[in-house]
Amino acid sequence: MESDVSDLPEGVSTSSEVSLDELQLSQRNHGMHLEGLRYDVTPAGMHYLLIHFDVPETDETDWLLSVGGLVRKPLELSMAGLRSRPSLTMPVTMECAGNGRARLSPRPISQPWITEAIGTADWTGTPLRPILEEAGIEDDAVELVFRGADHGIQGGVEQDYERSLSLENAMRDEVILAYAMNGEPLPPQHGSPLRLVVPGWYGMTSVKWLTAIEAVPEPFRGFQMEAYRARQEPDEEGEPVTRMAPRALLVPPGFPEFLTRSRIVDVGRHMLMGRAWSGWGPIERVDVSSDGGATWAEAAVGEAVSPYAWVPWTFWWDAAEPGAFELCCRATDAAGNSQPLEQPWNLHGFSNNMVQRVPVEVRSPADP
Ligand SMILES: Nc1nc2c(c(=O)[nH]1)N[C@H]1C(S)=C(S)[C@@H](COP(=O)(O)O)O[C@H]1N2
Ligand SMILES: [Mo]
């Protein structure tokens, strides 16, 4: 869907070419290489990154997490203390809410993701709920605000990175304070020494470099809460961005052309593989198209390595004739949510889960 370009709001561009500012953002915040979809758990260096400001200088030896605000017993927790508490390790698929933004028209000017703002890491941490119970949340608290150690200016507002969760969402069993990723201490860029991990939600919720948790009596209206809302107009209230919309991605088959990354495969049968996930429930089916979404056939869906991780899927593609094809894949979750063929537009480019399109040239083996 195209928005009306006659009165273009600030912060969007009608050019399909990204600016140097966006290039700079996309170098600091790299995506996952799509061939990395072959791994159940993404190698840490391949996992996407989104860092709003700078990676802060942190030291695990004197790190203290404070739990305060409307609590009966404020806590100061050291990393040694957090590590000695019960631990939980689980693979969690995380996706940036801005994934898919770069193809929108007009394009919201921000980190220009195409489809690669994803990854699945094996996070280890301690469940949040027992800590909240120990602190004793007062009855008049409605939300928890999670504060990161990073600081900067966004939208003209100087801020620490802060996001909130309702008590109900924060108390869920799968919400952890993570100190390890893929069996190693968190790397600096992923939140060392401590981060929140909220499975099923878009990544902005999983606050990195976590220094404070504060119980508050009103819904928190900080910058990062107001920013992550889907709106058509700047002055609209909009809908909060929460859980991940379903998405399937495929490992691009064959080999790529360097600049365009378009694919070349030989005539024959090819096993396509990919992953699919949704924050709204298990993946029920994945469909594949080789004609740009005109016709679809069902893929074989495998087992996820955890309830919060993507599922693998495979599909035998019979590329019988040479020519130009467009591969697409589409996930449907148990709640009945699926992926559109046309991209949903909003002012900041959130939750664009339009189906992936991979142009492929099928050549006969005799072609040079
Ligand atoms: N403190 C802090 N936490 C943060 C961010 C940030 O900039 N600062 N970025 C958020 C966003 S938008 C995303 S998508 C995820 C990315 O996590 P990753 O970089 O470990 O993949 O972290 C979230 N947590
Ligand atoms: Mo993000």
Image: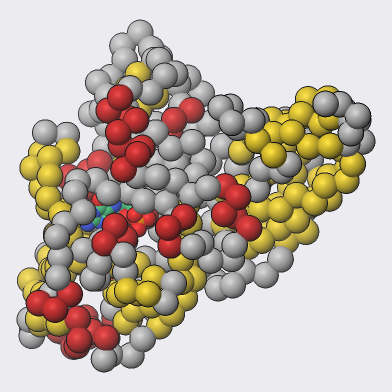
Q: Is residue 191 visible?
A: no
Work out whether residue 320 or residue 2 is closer to the camera in this orientation and state it: 320
Q: Is residue 101 visible?
A: yes
Residue beneath the point at 8% across and 42% down: 158
Q: In which quadrant is the C terminus drawn?
A: top right
Classify residue 352 as left or right of residue 29. right
- Give percent across and percent down for residue 268: 89, 41
**Number of callouts:** 0
**Scheme by which the image is coloured:** secondary structure
Work out whether residue 273 or residue 348 is closer to the camera in this orientation and state it: 273
Work out whether residue 133 or residue 160 is closer to the camera in this orientation and state it: 160
- Give percent across and percent down for residue 63: 13, 74
Work out whether residue 295 or residue 269 is closer to the camera in this orientation and state it: 269
Residue 200 found in image quarter:
bottom left
Q: Looking at the picture, does residue 131 appear above or below residue 254?
A: below
Residue beneath the point at 78% across and 59% down: 300
Q: Looking at the picture, does residue 60 appear above or below residue 206?
A: below
Farthest top residue in view:
6
- Give percent across and percent down for residue 137: 16, 79
Residue beneath the point at 56% across and 27% down: 259
Classify residue 361 as left or right of residue 5. right
Residue beneath the point at 17% across and 75% down: 60
Classify residue 202 as left or right of residue 52. right
Q: Looking at the picture, does residue 113 appear above or below residue 199?
A: above
Farthest front residue in view:
368
Classify residue 144 as left or right of residue 329. left
Location of ligand 1 given as a quarter of the image? bottom left
- Give percent across and percent down for residue 164: 23, 59
